[in-house]
């Protein structure tokens, strides 16, 4: 792959062979200390475990800017991709359209936290003025390597303007997030719901917990046998959802070693045997539910481990929101609200860009209408 190094008297824009090429403190100072999924620990755990890299279709090619002292001052987690798996922002129709026109959509450049539909910064900046240099660097990488496009997915809203300023196309979609309105406890949240919905949630929690022991683990309390149990759950869910799980077993060990204090593993036990689990990551302003699985179906246990326990943790830690992953309209009845998510796209072919821009304009209107429609179905009391 062409490196596309560009240097001025002060700055150098370059590709690196992986996030592990940099110093952890310098990388995290650009945003990884606030968002777990762009942290040095998370991204290098994916690299070192073989979850990304050769044979996965996610080849790490982070784009970075260093100053005259070779200090990292801006970066983006970037991947050369030959497919669209593990992204959660679906562009298969775009790929099909370009292929029908006789041109290749793959390879492409993906600016993302792999396999992670969670919002976060995609431009890691010591100074906002560096955003344009990073975006231009991504475009040059595409042009020099014959990539059709570059895509930044699940971008924090406060960075979307930086992509717009770089003339990237903006796309929106919806997720369901739980929003913490300074609740003292779970009952305080329930008190905001309509009576029938409040009773339903209480019944679900009671049924899910009946006869089970639920344990939360974090940091050094997460042992190898806990990961072994969770790996079984994760494999089952991954096989059913994606065909092949994205993460290797070693990824969980490395994440636990490197960032265990930013993870909460919730396990449900029956007669001291773990039968289900959910894994959460904790950022500075959110808890993120990521993986779930079970070895035995228990009614409502998925809602308890993935949604209600996450709400408990957010309230206890004073976190503003819970992001419980992609899709899932069933979250609406559990107090999760429709929230827009954002992505940004650069397309090399002018005619293709024009067609996609027209599609996005029409799609945004539909997303806005869906948000209004779903917002009217939240379970809160009228006037609440």
Image (cartoon, helix red, strand yellow):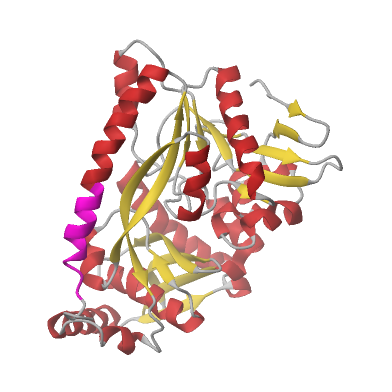
Left or right of 58? Residue 220 is right
Determine the main secondary structure of the stretch shown in magenta: helix
> Which of the 4 image quadrants contains residue 14?
top right
- In the rendered image, the vertical position of residue 377 relative to residue 349, given as above or below: below
Q: Residue furthest left?
A: 196
Quarter in which the N terminus is drawn = top right
Q: Residue furthest right?
A: 69
Residue drawn at x 37%, y 49% as measured from the top left = 238
Quarter in which the C terminus is drawn = bottom left
Q: Is residue 336 visible?
A: yes
Work out whether residue 320 or residue 45 is closer to the camera in this orientation and state it: 320
Q: Let me know if residue 354 is in the magenta part.
A: no
Q: Is residue 268 visible?
A: no
Residue drawn at x 59%, y 43% as measured from the top left = 77
Q: Position of residue 101 (x, y in %)?
A: 31, 12
Left or right of 370? Residue 174 is right
Left or right of 80? Residue 290 is left
- In the rendered image, the vertical position of residue 339 relative to residue 357, given as above or below: below
Q: Residue furthest top?
A: 102
For the record, the magenta segment spans: 367-379
Residue drawn at x 54%, y 43% as measured from the top left = 51
Q: Position of residue 286 (x, y in %)?
A: 48, 68
> Which of the 4 image quadrants contains residue 20?
top right
């Amino acid at each position: 792959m062409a490196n596309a190094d560009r240097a001025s008297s002060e700055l150098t824009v370059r590709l690196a062979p992986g996030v592990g090429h940099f110093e952890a403190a310098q990388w995290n100072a650009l945003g990884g200390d606030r968002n777990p999924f762009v942290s040095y620990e998370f991204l290098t755990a994916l690299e070192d475990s073989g979850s990304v890299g050769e044979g996965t279709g996610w080849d790490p090619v982070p784009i970075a800017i260093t100053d005259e002292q070779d200090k990292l001052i801006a970066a983006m987690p970037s991947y050369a991709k030959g497919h669209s798996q593990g992204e959660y922002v679906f562009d298969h129709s775009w790929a099909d359209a370009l292929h029908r026109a006789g041109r290749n959509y793959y390879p492409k450049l993906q600016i993302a936290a792999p396999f992670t539909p969670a919002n976060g910064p995609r431009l890691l900046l010591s100074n906002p003025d560096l955003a344009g240099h990073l975006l231009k660097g991504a475009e040059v990488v595409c042009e020099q390597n014959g990539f059709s496009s570059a895509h930044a997915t699940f971008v924090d809203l406060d960075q979307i303007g930086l992509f717009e300023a770089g003339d990237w196309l903006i796309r929106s979609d919806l997720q369901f997030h739980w929003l913490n309105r300074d609740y003292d406890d779970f009952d305080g949240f329930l008190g905001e719901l309509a009576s029938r919905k409040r009773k339903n949630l209480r019944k679900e929690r009671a049924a899910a917990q009946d006869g089970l022991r639920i344990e939360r683990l974090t940091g050094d309390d997460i042992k190898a046998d806990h990961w072994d149990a969770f790996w079984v759950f994760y494999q089952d869910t991954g096989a059913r959802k994606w065909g092949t799980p994205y993460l290797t077993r070693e990824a969980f060990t490395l994440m636990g070693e490197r960032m265990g204090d930013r993870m909460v593993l919730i396990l449900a036990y029956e007669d001291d045997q773990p039968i289900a689990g959910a894994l959460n990551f904790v950022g500075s302003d959110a808890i993120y539910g990521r993986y779930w699985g079970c070895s035995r179906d228990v009614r409502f246990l998925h809602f308890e481990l993935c949604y209600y326990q996450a709400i408990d943790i957010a309230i206890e830690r004073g976190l503003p929101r819970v992001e419980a992953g992609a899709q899932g309209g069933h979250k609406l009845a559990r107090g999760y609200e429709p929230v827009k998510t954002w992505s940004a796209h650069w397309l090399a072919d002018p005619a293709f860009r024009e067609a996609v821009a027209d599609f996005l304009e029409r799609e945004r209107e539909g997303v806005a209408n869906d948000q209004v429609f779903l917002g009217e179905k939240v379970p809160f009391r009228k006037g609440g």
